Amino acid sequence: MMNSPEQHLSPKQHLLEVDGLQVDFKTDDGLVQAVRGVSFYLDRGETLGIVGESGSGKSVTNLALMGLVPRPPGIVKSGRALLDGQDLLQMSDNALTAVRGAKIAMIFQDPMTALNPFLTVEEQLTEMTILHLNHTPAEARDHAVSMLEQVGIPGAARRMRDYPHHFSGGMRQRVMIAMALSCEPDVLIADEPTTALDVTIQAQILDLMAELQSEHQTAIILITHDLGVVASVCDRVMVMYAGKIVEEADAPSLFANPRHPYTMGLLESVPRLDRPHGVSLSAIEGQPPDLAHLPPGCSFAPRCPYALEKCTVEAPPLTDRIDQGRFACFVNVDDSEPKPFAAKRT
Amino acid sequence: MNNSAHHEKTSSAESLLSVKNLRVHFPVRRGGWLRGERCLIRAVDGVSFDVAEGETLGLVGESGCGKSTTARAILNLNRATAGEVWLDVARIDQLSPSAMLPHRRKIQMIFQDPFASLNPRMTVGRIVSEPMDIFNLHSRRDRKLEAMRLLDLVGLNPRFLNRYPHEFSGGQRQRIGVARALAVQPKIIICDEPVSALDVSIQAQVINLMMDLQQKLGLSYVFIAHDLAVVRHIADRVGVMYLGKIVELATSDELYRSPQHPYKQALLSAAPVPDPVVERQRKRIQLTGEVPSPDRVYPGCSFADRCPIADAACREKSPQLEGEAHAVSCFKPQLLAPTVANNT
Ligand SMILES: Nc1ncnc2c1ncn2[C@@H]1O[C@H](COP(=O)(O)OP(=O)(O)OP(=O)(O)O)[C@@H](O)[C@H]1O
Ligand SMILES: Nc1ncnc2c1ncn2[C@@H]1O[C@H](COP(=O)(O)OP(=O)(O)O)[C@@H](O)[C@H]1O
Ligand code: SF4
Ligand code: SF4
Ligand SMILES: [Mg+2]
Ligand SMILES: [Mg+2]
């Protein structure tokens, strides 16, 4: 089939298309099914949020896209991840190195996992653009200074010689963002980028990401457990539970009209600044399942107030919401009586 | 049962815990221990508050502002450099560990990290009954029954008695920490970020548990957290800390609806709420600059470098915390813009 540029840019084709991703870990405790058939897409210039409890597979999903799942114990068992038509999961290590940083980059909760403590900021920033953009050392230096300025490091030229430990937590996070964005990647994966930061610094970093995004049309995947952050910056949201996507929709629809009981429970269990003091929170009872010993059927069933008998034998497939989105539940929560979540004995 | 709550009650107007002008300074060397210059970290620099029986006092503020150091100094785990801590009618700062011990029956602590704060080699039963051994509470045989009762009270299966901490999830470990704190029937528990490490659904379970226990047992809490919404939810009164000082202190509803200190307002406006409709209409108060360092001495208001309404006078003199019901430390206290809490 001919692949004309028009076709390539047609709105049907997404920048990134992930299909049926499965990742396992072999552990002493048995086979941990960390990601169990995850499919989603990402378009240029949009921010996709991924939320879910710790251990639900958010990080592993994205590590797989970056080719960073530790092997062993991990194996990417199946799936495709097409970035501009190229399958990231089938690439050779060399090809991946060329793509990583240039087309797809990642920032982490702890900046020290991405920054080398023994190299100056200059060395780390210039390395990237010399490798990917064929910059001369002088060009690379100028570019690095301008990136540091863009992320708001005061005295950028002077601070190039500093080592990461000379910066505060918030500034390191900015240096890492500068590094991740220095080759203008098409996709930026941000894994809990502000979780370790104070709210005032978090607000600055989120604003910065949005600014850089609108300049370069970067597509962002934002992993977070903070529903407030999701509400303030994400266009679309995916909710993960026990290695699967249980619901996905554009942000306003998801918050206004959650269809999956887990999403509903999550939204009801956060204390909110715009709610008065002292009202009791509805908590989801119990705990997320052990991924090495998953219950049959819907993995949310042991905690779900809506669960039917069927839910403990059969896993609900992802079905369409009325508004483009998807959800995986047998029950239509609107047709059934509201069932409050409550903190019961565990 | 020998319950300290049966002692003569102090009048309700009197406070259970009273912290007066507390200071904790750490002398350190900067930049290599040979030629490094000496400096003083003013981690806590004049903090005062009272906590009444059955009340929850919240403490919020950004990383490094001195919340944990305040908590540790109240329990005498850090020696106070100056100031006083009163529990009931006894002054407890400056006490030696052995002199402090009897007071530890009234005041207990729970910590942020549910993974680090429990001894991995002890069974849950031992962890919960150890404080009873120390204070010689109950007969030896009854201690096991009491431990089972406490596990049940915090929502854990009493049969878990012989399991080890690693067999529990984060939320369950935090429940174990609460059970251990309750083992000596304290009057007040100092909680340092007790739910910060937990997932939201589990966090809600532990918050509800703590509020239930408070009602049942008439406990007081000092509840430290950096999550403003969590603190609003649980605390009756809230103190906002900045660089070792309380800059605003008021009832929870008052402080969130009508904050007067520019810093508190900046914090509130930076905290996102889980509602895209609200978020898309919000305007934020922009703060520039990083949190300043506690090893510097600021001649004027320590917030002046980041304050959107600072003027020359703010850089000359330090404001003091003033006011009874709603205390503020600012020369120009005012509501800069409506807060999200005004919608309630
Ligand atoms: N033993 C110590 N020696 C020197 N400095 C210390 C010591 N303990 C704390 N500090 C300093 O005192 C200040 C207050 O620390 P503290 O741990 O009380 O902050 P915090 O408000 O609890 O912060 P977080 O939200 O990060 O827990 C910080 O600047 C910290 O680095
Ligand atoms: N290197 C590893 N070895 C074994 N198990 C792992 C490894 N990395 C992740 N896992 C498991 O995979 C599951 C998903 O983890 P992760 O994607 O990190 O969750 P989160 O949603 O919190 O980011 C968890 O059960 C986790 O314990
Ligand atoms: S499928 Fe059944 S158990 Fe699963 S979320 Fe829906 S109602 Fe609950
Ligand atoms: S005293 Fe001045 S600088 Fe300090 S908070 Fe008030 S207005 Fe701002
Ligand atoms: Mg993660
Ligand atoms: Mg602390």
Image: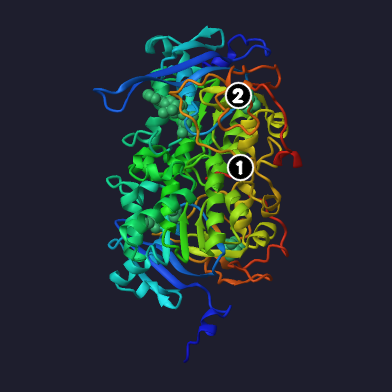
Q: Which quadrant of the figure has residue B263?
A: top right
Q: Residue furthest right?
A: B343
Q: Disc 2 beta carbon < 8 A from ligand 4? A: yes
Left or right: where does residue B170 sit relative to residue B223?
left
State the residue lying farthest toward the front. Answer: A138
Q: Which residue is mark 1?
A: B271
Q: Is residue A51 above or below residue B335?
A: below
Q: Position of residue A54 (x, y in %)?
A: 46, 52
Decide: few, some or many residues near mark 1? Use Cα within 10 Å; few <14, some 14-19, many ≥20: many
Residue under circle 2?
A: B247
Tell me the residue at 58%/64% (across/down): A247
x, y percent for residue A177: 44, 52
- Which numbered disc flags the more N-terminal residue, 1 or 2? 2
Farthest residue to the left: give it.
B34
The answer to whether A159 appears left or right of B228 in the picture is left
Q: Amino acid at mark 1?
A: Ala
Q: Are marks 1 and 2 on the same chain?
A: yes
In front here: B109 or A151? A151
Q: Which residue is at 56% across, 40% downward?
A: A200
Chain bearing mark 1:
B
Q: Is residue B211 above or below residue A15?
A: above
Q: At label 2, which amino acid type do we have?
A: Val
Image x and y of residue A250, in percent:
63, 64
- At a point 37% along the width and 68% down the height, the residue shown is A99
The response on whether ligand 1 sits within 8 Å of label 1 is no
